[in-house]
Image: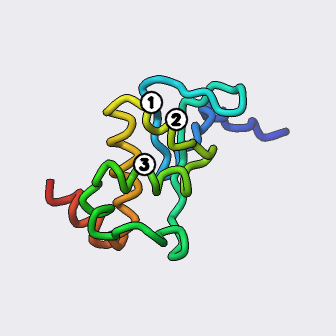
């Protein structure tokens, strides 16, 4: 006599989580003819901070962010595209960029303290 197989549990497809430094824009931007709704920030290398003030980046000074963000956004955004972003989207990208100045442990502690 053959054993009956137990019923298989239904599994739902797992939706991939966005990368921790991926910002969902409130309004899409056009990059190379395609509408983009998410921008990923990569950690800047030391040379990409040349000519910028780390103190002002930590303070999210708008002018410094306008110069830094084109260097670290994927897909790459120009300064003109960044200037045209909504305040909410610009702030989200700026906060993401500034977060690279904090260690992951300190960032986690900061989030848990809220």
Q: Is label 1 in a helix, a strand or a loop? A: loop
Q: Are marks 3 and 2 in contact (CB under 8 Å)?
A: no
Q: CA distance from mark 1 to mark 3?
A: 11 Å
Picture coordinates of residue 65 (x, y %)? Answer: 39, 52
x 35%, y 51%: residue: 63
**Circles 1, 3 touching at the beta carbon (< 8 Å):** no
Label annotation for residue 84: 1
Which residue is the extreme one toward the front? 51
Q: Label 3 vs label 2: CA separation?
A: 10 Å
Q: Is residue 2 left or right of residue 81?
A: right
Q: Decide: is 36 above or below 52.
A: above
Counting other residues with Cα less than 10 Å from the Cα at mark 1, is it few (<14), some (14-19), or many (20 or more)? few
Could you tell me which residue is drawn at 53 percent across and 25 percent down?
A: 28
Q: Quadrant of the N terminus?
A: top right
Residue at left 35%, top 59%?
98
75 sits to left or right of 100 = right
How crowded is the residue under tag 3: few (<14 C-alpha within 10 Å), some, or many (20+)?
A: some
Image coordinates of residue 49 in percent, x first then y, are: 47, 69
Q: Earlier in the sequence, mark 1 or mark 3?
A: 3
- Determine the secondary structure under disc 3: helix
Report the residue at 23% width, 66% height from top: 109
Structural distance between the alpha carbons of marks 2 and 1: 5 Å
Left or right side of 21 for 61: left
Between residues 67 and 94, which one lies in front from this camera angle? Answer: 67
Percent from the top left, x then y, of residue 31?
A: 65, 33
Which disc, if any, is residue 81? 2
Tag 2 near tag 1, CB within 8 Å = yes
Residue under pointer 3 = 66
Report whether 19 appears left or right of 97.
right
Indicate the secondary structure of the residue bearing disc 2.
Answer: helix
């Amino acid at each position: 006599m053959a054993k009956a197989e137990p019923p298989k549990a239904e599994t739902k497809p797992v939706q991939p989580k966005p990368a921790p430094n991926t910002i969902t824009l409130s309004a899409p931007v056009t990059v190379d003819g395609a509408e983009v709704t998410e921008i990923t920030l990569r950690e800047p290398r030391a040379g990409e901070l040349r000519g910028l003030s780390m103190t002002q980046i930590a303070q999210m000074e708008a002018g410094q962010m306008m110069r830094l963000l084109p260097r670290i956004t994927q897909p790459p955004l120009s300064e003109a595209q960044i200037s045209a972003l909504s305040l909410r989207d610009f702030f989200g990208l700026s906060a993401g960029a500034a977060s690279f100045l904090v260690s992951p442990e300190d960032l986690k502690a900061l989030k848990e303290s809220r």
